[in-house]
Image: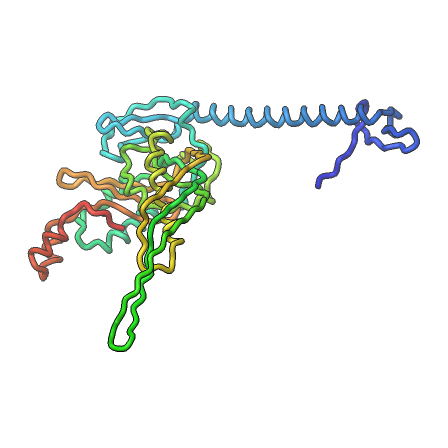
């Protein structure tokens, strides 16, 4: 507990309680104050301190907004429409979706300033090394995929995400059975007992993610999870130096349906897993309610690499915090034919269909 020091209203010196007068006296200027005068002074001083603190917080937010508005630059790709964010010192040379070099800079509005960010944990050289090692384990890839000219297009991107918190109340009901088989004499019996099951519970969900980009593949972003949200820090434009970021084009309301479905599924699973000890369980009804829902706009680090092969664009992504890799990668017909030379034609056809997520 903090120590309270009563100060003289006139000179600021310490006050001492005098038992004989039941008042507070300053030994420096000899002023004397009643209990009410001291109490009123303390209340006013506390209110003033809180007002100054509140003013300082508002000023800090104002400076952050001003920094974002002055330094954040937006680039719109004229080919695919992707909107990229970076600082005013970074030169964007191509769109990481379609490789179009034509971009138009403009200032961004403060509403797009994120609240939090997880900074990149390793540089471009390390990301390239991890990517090449990963590709070596994919024997059907074209060798051109990891050529120096292609790897130069590897880009560090801060992807917009919404992190949701909420409280969830759930209830499920259904029927269950317990089956017992036993033998008596020469006869084998099966006994089935039927039960009515009911489960209710509540849970708190924290940091449920949903990317806020229409052009980002939601499945690809999901595969890159999880992130360690302990590394979330207050956003500053300095984190964008040397990197790009994508401006969200889906706000929290646009992605709420996706997050709501995920939370409801998880809540139902938690309740279902609590029904144990039965031979069979059939859930007939369930109800999940969500309340106290809140969302935080954050940027999460991703190393992105897109590759155009035979008229199609393939996307590779790496978690910029953990190094986890996923991608929709092209298959080289020549290498596939050689690799599957000893495999039946039917099996080859099944395995050579591209576009599968690999990780």
Q: Measuring 18% from the left and 45% from the top, which residue is drawn there?
A: 355
Query: For this view, does 350 lie left or right of residue 75?
Result: left
Q: Measuring 81% from the left and 22% from the top, which residue is drawn there?
A: 10
Query: For this view, does 266 lie left or right of residue 219?
Result: right
Residue 124 visible at all? no
Q: Measuring 24% from the left and 54% from the top, which residue is drawn there?
A: 136
Rendering coords of residue 24 (x, y %): 85, 29
Rendering coords of residue 177 (x, y %): 32, 58
Q: Nearer the viewer, residue 286 or 57?
A: 286
Query: For this view, does 93 lie left or right of residue 339?
Result: right
Quarter of the image with the N terminus is: top right
Rendering coords of residue 291 (x, y %): 44, 35
Looking at the rendering, which quadrant does residue 296 occupy? top left
Rendering coords of residue 311 (x, y %): 14, 37
Q: Is 335 drawn above or below residue 53 in the view shown?
A: below
Looking at the rendering, which quadrant does residue 264 occupy? top left
Q: Measuring 93% from the left and 31% from the top, which residue is drawn there?
A: 20
């Amino acid at each position: 507990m903090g120590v309270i020091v009563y100060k003289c209203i006139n000179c600021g010196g310490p006050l001492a309680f005098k038992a004989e007068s039941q008042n507070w006296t300053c030994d420096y200027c000899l002023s004397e104050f009643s209990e009410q005068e001291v109490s009123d002074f303390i209340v006013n001083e506390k209110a003033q301190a809180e007002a100054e603190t509140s003013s300082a917080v508002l000023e800090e937010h104002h400076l952050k907004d001003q920094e974002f508005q002055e330094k954040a630059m937006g680039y719109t790709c004229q080919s695919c429409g992707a909107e990229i964010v970076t600082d005013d010192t970074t030169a964007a040379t191509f769109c990481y979706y379609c490789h179009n070099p034509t971009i138009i800079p403009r200032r961004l509005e403060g509403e797009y300033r994120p609240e939090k960010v997880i900074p990149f944990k390793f540089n471009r050289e390390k990301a390239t090394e991890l990517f090449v090692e990963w590709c070596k384990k994919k024997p059907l890839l074209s060798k051109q995929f990891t050529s120096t000219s292609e790897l130069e297009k590897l880009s560090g991107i801060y992807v917009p995400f919404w992190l949701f918190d909420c409280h969830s109340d759930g209830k499920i009901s259904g029927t269950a059975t317990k089956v017992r088989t036993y033998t008596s004499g020469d006869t084998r019996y099966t006994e089935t007992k039927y039960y009515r099951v009911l489960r209710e519970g509540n849970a708190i969900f924290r940091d449920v993610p949903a990317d806020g980009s229409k052009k980002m593949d939601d499945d690809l972003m999901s595969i890159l999870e999880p992130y360690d949200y302990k590394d979330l820090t207050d956003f500053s434009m300095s984190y964008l130096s040397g990197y790009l970021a994508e401006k969200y084009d889906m706000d929290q309301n646009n992605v709420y349906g996706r997050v709501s479905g995920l939370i409801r599924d998880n809540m139902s699973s938690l309740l279902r897993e609590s029904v144990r000890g039965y031979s069979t369980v059939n859930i007939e009804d369930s109800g999940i309610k969500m309340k106290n829902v809140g969302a935080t706009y954050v940027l999460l680090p991703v190393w992105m690499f897109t590759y155009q092969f035979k008229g199609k664009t393939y996307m590779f992504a790496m978690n910029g915090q953990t190094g986890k890799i996923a991608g929709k990668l092209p298959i080289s017909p020549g290498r596939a034919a050689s690799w599957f030379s000893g495999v039946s034609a039917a099996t080859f056809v099944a395995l050579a269909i591209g576009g599968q997520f690999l990780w």
